[in-house]
Image: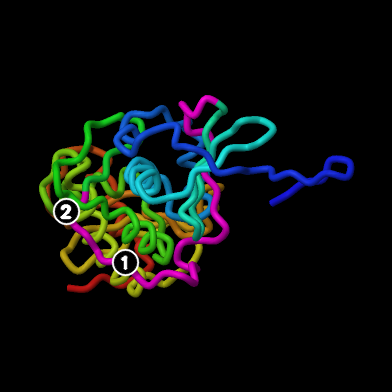
Amino acid sequence: MKRSKGNAWYPRWELTGAPMSPQQAFNSPIRGRVTHELNHHHDIQLAVAPRLLRPMLYDLASTGLWERHTTHGYYRLTDGQCHTFEWNNTGAIVEHYKAGHADDQCPKLTDPPRETSAWLPHFDNRPPLPPSGTPHGWRGILRRAASLPLAFLPPAVAFYGRYHFGHQDVGAATFAHTFHAMADEALTVYGRWETTPGHHFVQDSSGLIWSITTASSEDSAKPAVTGIYPPRGAPADHPEHQRANRASGSPTLATRRRPA
């Protein structure tokens, strides 16, 4: 893109050397707003967006195009398709994320593979590099999260990992397979939900109870999965889960007939 200055034309962005190595993607500072911008552009919710930032940066820093603003000195990194990260003028801090379209609407890509052994740390942890040979798997999760009819809130993913897989914590090595299993089940749950406004409890194929709300959110236009609870009659390790189990039998909340 060019801008005019008098009779002269000059480029706003010019090619430049990389201010960071791909390995630095796992410890460079990232502004908290960047995760909200990633969610905003792709509608993937804040359970997913924080896990994708560092592996995205690593892959783009390895293969993408670096440019620098000719006036203000800002850096940006793009994959030439739809993903762009912007740095401050020292190239030390990731300031913004931008995209031309949601990932599930990208005309240049087919659906990527579902890599369940991926390394996906929370961006705020500044984790070590992934084990050698571990796929990042961020693109498959980004595409799938963008196309799901439900949005996952962080507690829902944590509780699904706990009650479905027995994970005490959904970490960098367990997030991908937890997400993909939950995404598979989300399609079943969505099919059983009557999509009426309000807060509902719907049982999935394994007996876990999903809490879904249609309350509007500035983070997503989709109905949100706010929690996952044990099957009826199963002990819960949090009092609020027991309350949710009792509430799931209420005719005012359980608007969908449960399978036997």
Question: In the rendered view of the protein, which quadrant contains the C terminus?
Answer: bottom left
Q: Residue at x 17, y 57 (%)?
A: 231
User: Which is the main secondary structure of the residues drawn in magenta?
Assistant: loop
Q: Verify whether residue 112 appears in magenta.
A: yes
- Taking depth in this image into account, of 211 and 181 the one nearest to the observer is 181
Q: Residue at x 41, y 56 (%)?
A: 151
Whether residues under marks 1 and 2 lie with C-beta atoms below 8 angstroms apart, the answer is: no
The residues tagged by marks 1 and 2 sit, at their Cα atoms, a distance apart of 14 Å
Q: Residue at x 30, y 29 (%)?
A: 126
Task: List x then y, in percent, for residue 55.
Answer: 32, 45
Is residue 24 shown left or right of residue 118?
Answer: right
Query: What element does badge 2 sit on?
Result: loop
Residue identified by numbered label 1: 112
Give the magenta range: 90-118
Residue identified by numbered label 2: 117
Q: Is residue 158 above or below residue 102?
A: above
Task: List x then y, in percent, for residue 141.
Answer: 32, 58
How many residues crowd around disc 1 within 10 Å: few (fewer than 14), some, or many (20 or more)? Answer: some
Query: What element does badge 1 sit on?
Result: loop
Q: Mark 2 is on which residue type?
A: Ser
Is any part of residue 253 visible from this angle? no
Q: Quadrant of residue 61?
A: top left
Is any part of residue 235 visible from this angle? yes
Q: Verify whether residue 246 appears in magenta.
A: no
Task: List x then y, in percent, for residue 232.
Answer: 17, 57
User: Which mark sits nearer the N-terminus, 1 or 2?
Assistant: 1
- Taking depth in this image into account, of 90 and 197 the one nearest to the observer is 90
Picture disc at residue 177: none
